[in-house]
Image: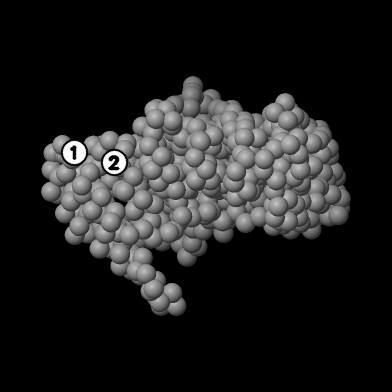
Amino acid sequence: MTSPVKLYVYDLSRGMARAMSMQFLGRQLDGIWHTSVVVFNKEVFYGQGIFITAPGQSHYGQPVSIQDMGETAIDEQIFEEYLAEMRGQYTADKSNHSLVDFNCNTFTNDCIGFLTGGSIPPWITNLPSDFLSTPFGAALRPTIDAMFNPPGPPLEQPYQPSSDRTTNTTANTPAPTSLDSGYSSSSSATPSTRGATMTIADPIHISTNPASFRNLLDSHRAVVAMFTSATCGPCRMIEPVFEELAHAKTSKGKDGGDRVAFVKVDLSVGMSTMVAREYNVAATPTFGFFLDSKRIHELKGVNAPELRTQVDLLLYQAFPPHPHMSLDLPAISSLSTEPILFTQVPAFDTVRDKLVSFIDNTSLANPSKVKDDLVMHIIPWLKQRYAVGSNKAAAPPPPPSHAVVNAFSRATTTLVAELPAASIFPLLDVWRLAILEPAIAQVSLAPLVQVLTTTNESSSSSSPRATLLTLLRLSTNALGTSLLSRSLLGTGADVRKRRAALTGVLVNTLLHADRLVRVAAASLAFNVGAWVQRGRVARVGGGEPAFDGIREGEEDGEWEVELVSAVAEALAGEEESEDAVHRLTATLAFLIRLSPNYEDQLLPLLNVLGVRETLKGKLGGDGKLKVRKKDIRALVEEVADKLCMDP
């Protein structure tokens, strides 16, 4: 006789991840998942120990999704014996949850593997490893903590196997219980481990059956497995070294981040002996080193130096260092990745009058409202914010009021939609300063993308020079804010559309006939390249960028090829501005250096386009422009000789 097995899925963010993640992360997260397994009319999950309650009666509320995991031929008594064995692995003092490898989800996956031989869906476990380090993750942290640590007495009560507890004869459903202390049916009873607090941090997986172990192998490129047992003295001697390596090699994406897993297989728990037999493990401690699901090495006994060496060798094979890491690049390394900003203050009264005159000559539905927003709110705030001769040593000016932000949102939305291209440049010119304020940046994304899209869809040659120049400067400043840079350059269907619009405007203006337009386009290109470089340098340094900079999963070879091709063509054609050559060369360095697509895509492209010869020509050749400044010459030469040739 078989029994159905269900997976209950809860969203710890209570819908906030789905609603807000795209805006703040530049990618969609549908939830922060917590799971439990429901079988034999019981809901079993890991929190501060292993808990059992009636289905849907835990403090997590009602599940957002119920997944059918099949059926199990294992009877209830055997499952209870399995949970009793698991008690030593999933204890309250180990309830240090990690949003990358949630122990609750690891426990659930173990149970599913034991019951059905299956595993929980990957969309539950594929939470980005850097989530909590982002401002959005920090904002959700109180909500997540509240879900883990509900106020008042717990809904789930202590549990012990049925042979050790008194049966509750008054209830038709199992009393909520925990495996970590004695049973009590009183609603005010508190488990002895209640003092433990949920935190976020344990990189070590636990596997108790072949299914969960295979799932770990399938979901991680590199796996280090420690086969241990409760009665093994030498295991306890080497275990601290294993745990130290797990923390050092997985924290914040270091050496592969969540691509590497450290897992303990306790042969005294569950069906772990089946895992051991599969790999001919007969003694403990034994360490298995797996690459792409295949065991490539085995280490037996207590040998801490050799364990460290083999872990490093595995990670080197799995994630070899980039060839650029061995190059000496002093000129490129000295480049600042801080964004270029256009902060020159215009004559606000003149800009206001020009914009009002354009509004008067356009058939707006409610022109007086837009003019009031400009005259009463936007321009006065900008004049105060960027007052000429202000004391720079004084405290920074306060952020714009809600009235100013709302006025700016209304005005930009209306004028972007209604003003013709030839009349919008005064708005863009004041917008480039306002967008540096986070509150204004938050309401700027949609109208900015609309301007970029409209301009990209029309020929740059037909767009007025003043409009192109101010739009490029506005876009350059937009990439100076971490919020908008990710929303314009990250991944996801909507973000890719925005990125395509921005890239289209950039590529078309890099070859514009006007020198100032080209310099502004080169500045925008620099900020794009700097954003890419900041992310790559952060990963090399030991972790994904918290919020600003490209992440590993956002690297896009086709986009890089498009940008590098455009920058190379602009460099070849630039014969007037040394500043443009400087910014374009720096952009090229940022896009090429540490690129995961360097050897397969970018280096062949650089050879075909003759980029090295183009750069050398800027140092002395037949072209009109010869680079004179010493630091720019050093940069041009280094990019030509170090990045545009086989390393």
Label 2 environment density (alpha carbons within 10 Å; few <14, some 14–19, many ≥20) = many
* Amino acid type, label 1: Thr
Vertical position of residue 214 compared to residue 251: above or below: above
Circle 2: residue type:
Ser
Taking the image as shown, residue 489 lies to the left or right of residue 219, namely left
Is disc 1 in contact with disc 2, using a CB cutoff of under 8 Å? Answer: yes
347 to the left or right of 574? left
Quarter of the image that includes the C terminus: top right
Residue 362's disc is 1
Res 449 seen here: no
Residue 148 figure quarter: bottom left
Q: Position of residue 563 (x, y in %)?
A: 58, 34
Residue in the picture at 36% in, 65% down: 386
Mark 2 sits on what residue? Answer: 423
Most extreme residue toward the top is 1
Picture colour scheme: one colour
